[in-house]
Each structure stands twice: as C-alpha cells, then as structure tokens.
Amino acid sequence: MSEDDQTGIPATVADPDLRRVYLRPVHKRDRSEFLTQMEESRSLHEPWINPPLTPYGFQNYLARTHRDDHEGLLVCERASHAITGVINLNNIVRGTFLSASLGYYGTRKYGGLGYMQEGLELVKDYAFRSLGLHRLEANIQPDNHRSLALVRKCGFEREGFSRAFLYLAGAWRDHERWVAIDPRLTLHR
C-alpha cells in the first residue's frame, strides 16, 4: 500500500463513495492524534490490549509496521479523516501458509458507530485480494465480548481455544481462535 494512497485499498475492492471509513498506513505524522486517541481510550482497551501510549512506544510500533511481516492500518472516518481505530496484520506468512494474525482496537470517541466493523471488512478484502492471503486469524480472550461480537459480524468462525496463549497484564491468558478464510477459494476435502 503506498503512503500516498488515501483509501488504502484498490477501487475494485470497495467503492470509496459507499464507505464511511477508509484504510491507510500509519505514518509518523499521525503520532500526536494517535497517542491522544489511545490515551483517551485506555479504559476501552484494558485489559485486552496495550496500544502505544508514549512517543517511544509509537516509534517502535511504526518501525514494526515497516517490516515485511507486519502492516499497521488506520481506520479513518471519511468525512473528517480522524483516526477511528487501528487494525494490524501481524506475523504475515507467505509461501504455502498465506496467513496473518489480526490485532485491532477502536477509539472511545468513535465507538459504537460501526466503524471498526467497516474497517475489518475492508482489511479482509485488502488481505485476501491485494496481499493474496488465504487466512486471517483473530485470537480473543473469552471475556472480550465486544471483540467477539465484531468478528462474528464480520463472518469469522470460531476454530478453537488456545490455553495460556498470550502473556498479558501479568498472566498467561486463554484465547478463542477465530478465522476468516478467503471465500473465493475452493476447499478440497
């Protein structure tokens, strides 16, 4: 995805005029707005995820998004261009796997408006059509009801349960594994 691309996705994937949000890569110029939004949304994110809250944390996050195996995408409101959420494609694996794991978080200011649902649908299209991935995986703590509702609305299917999957907030946390597979593919069973 080019830095100059405002929508972040090809026009063939989603008509920009029909969406309230668009995707774009995170840039260093986003630091101030990003950090303000994340600080204001701490109570929404904790204990589920720990987005960057400091300039140093933002710089590390930005550096990670420039690696070949990660993409950091901002979900932005079309009308104001404000950051309404973040969706990361992590651990992108090519070759025969063609998969990535998702990390995402919305902002309190724009919560409940359906922007993250629209953003996640755009990311699915981008990952499957533009990046050529086959599978997206979201690992979610069982008590994170908002996140579980989001992936259900976006067509993910529960695939399994992973005990002591991630070390968060001082403990190993169980996670449910939710998956979306490119619907254009024919599965041979």
Image: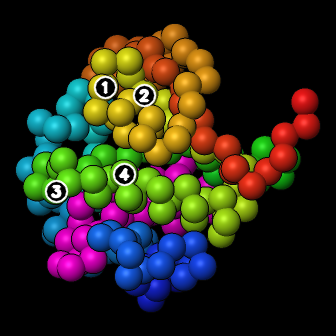
Q: Is residue 19 magenta?
A: no
Q: Residue at left 31%, top 46%?
A: 105
* Residue at mark 2: 140
User: In the displayed structure, does residue 189 sit left or right of residue 146?
Assistant: right
Q: How is the image coloured?
A: rainbow
Marks 2 and 4 sit apart, C-alpha to C-alpha, by 16 Å
Residue 26, by quadrant, is bottom left
* Callout 4: SS: helix
Amino acid at the residue labelled 3: Tyr
* Residue at mark 1: 144
Mark 1 or mark 3: whose residue is earlier in sequence: 3
* Callout 2: SS: strand
User: In the displayed structure, does residue 91 sit left or right of residue 172?
Assistant: right
- In the rendered image, residue 66, in percent from the top left (x then y), is placed at 52, 66
Marks 4 and 1 sit apart, C-alpha to C-alpha, by 16 Å
- Which residue occupies the extreme right position in the image? 188
Marks 3 and 2 sit apart, C-alpha to C-alpha, by 21 Å
Magenta range is: 63-90
* Residue at mark 4: 117
* Residue at mark 3: 110
As drawn, 20 above or below 5 = above
Amino acid at the residue labelled 1: Asn
